[in-house]
Image (cartoon, rainbow, N blue to C red):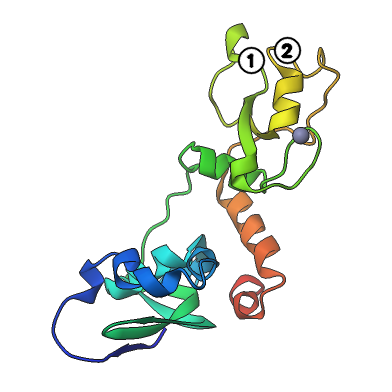
Amino acid sequence: MSVHRHSSGGEDGRHSVTAVFGIRQQSDPQALHAPVLVLNASYEPINICAARRAIVLVLKGVAMAEEEDGHLLHAARLALRVPSVIRLLEYRRIPHQTRALSRKNILLRDRNTCQYCGELLSASDLTLDHVVPRSRGGASTWENLVACCHPCNRRKGNQMPVEAGMKLMREPHAFNLHTSRHIMRLMGRSDDKWRKYLFY
Ligand SMILES: [Zn+2]
């Protein structure tokens, strides 16, 4: 990402991206939500984040842009291109443990797809379903939570899938490094700028 400062002084990295780009962001709201591939200092792909977060990391001097996506953001004293791939400047050891259990990570693992009917939906149209209902002692774990659309969630209610005549598309597992690599590759397949970092 090229950062052109129109005047010196000030620590732009300390401002939030929304504050710096508040006005123009309205004209292209998708640009800041676009997925950005995050590479370790070693060029190993380690994560995907939203462009907004990637810009903050670059402005803070934590990462540098390796590839840009063509969108130019303007602000009073600053113009920069939205990155498509960023690389951390300092190597981070990535623990080979599972990721935090969160709604966001469950939806990412299930690729925003209802695990009962297979419909691909936006995050706001999905909920989390306890496969074994909480009322029957079902825990909030990677293995018992799946992405689910609202109609399927209502239909299942407090039943076991088999009682509701429903079947999971796949057994839910913890989100490990292997899963995230797989997802990064799926997402990168259509993006030439990601491809060279993901397929080697
Ligand atoms: Zn569904």
Amino acid type, mark 1: Pro
Separation of disc 1 and disc 2 at Cα? Answer: 7 Å
Graded by Cα atoms within 10 Å as few (under 14), some (14 to 19) or many (20 or more), the crowding at tag 2 reads some
Where is residue 128, by image quadrant? top right
**Marks 1,2: beta carbons within 8 A:** yes
| Disc 2 element | loop
Q: Earlier in the sequence, mark 1 or mark 2?
A: 1
Which residue is denoted by mark 1 in the rendering?
A: 133
Residue at 65%, 33% in the rendered image = 146
What number of labels is visible?
Answer: 2
Residue in the foreground of this view, choosing between 82 and 186:
82
Whether residue 42 is visible to the viewer of this picture, yes or no, is no
Picture layout, residue 187 above or below residue 128: below
Residue at 67%, 43% in the rendered image = 110
Given the current orientation, which residue lies at the most extreme top position? 136
Where is residue 173, by image quadrant? top right
Q: Quadrant of the C terminus?
A: bottom right
Where is residue 164, by image quadrant? top right
Residue in the foreground of this view, choosing between 170 and 68:
68
The quarter of the picture showing ligand 1: top right
**In the rendering, at what x and y percent does residue 34 appear?**
55, 66
Amino acid type, mark 2: Gln
* Disc marking residue 159: 2
Graded by Cα atoms within 10 Å as few (under 14), some (14 to 19) or many (20 or more), the crowding at tag 1 reads some
Whether residue 193 is visible to the viewer of this picture, yes or no, is yes
Q: Is residue 45 left or right of residue 65?
A: right
**In the rendering, at what x and y percent does residue 176 appear?**
56, 45
| Disc 1 element | loop
Residue at 70%, 16% in the rendered image = 157
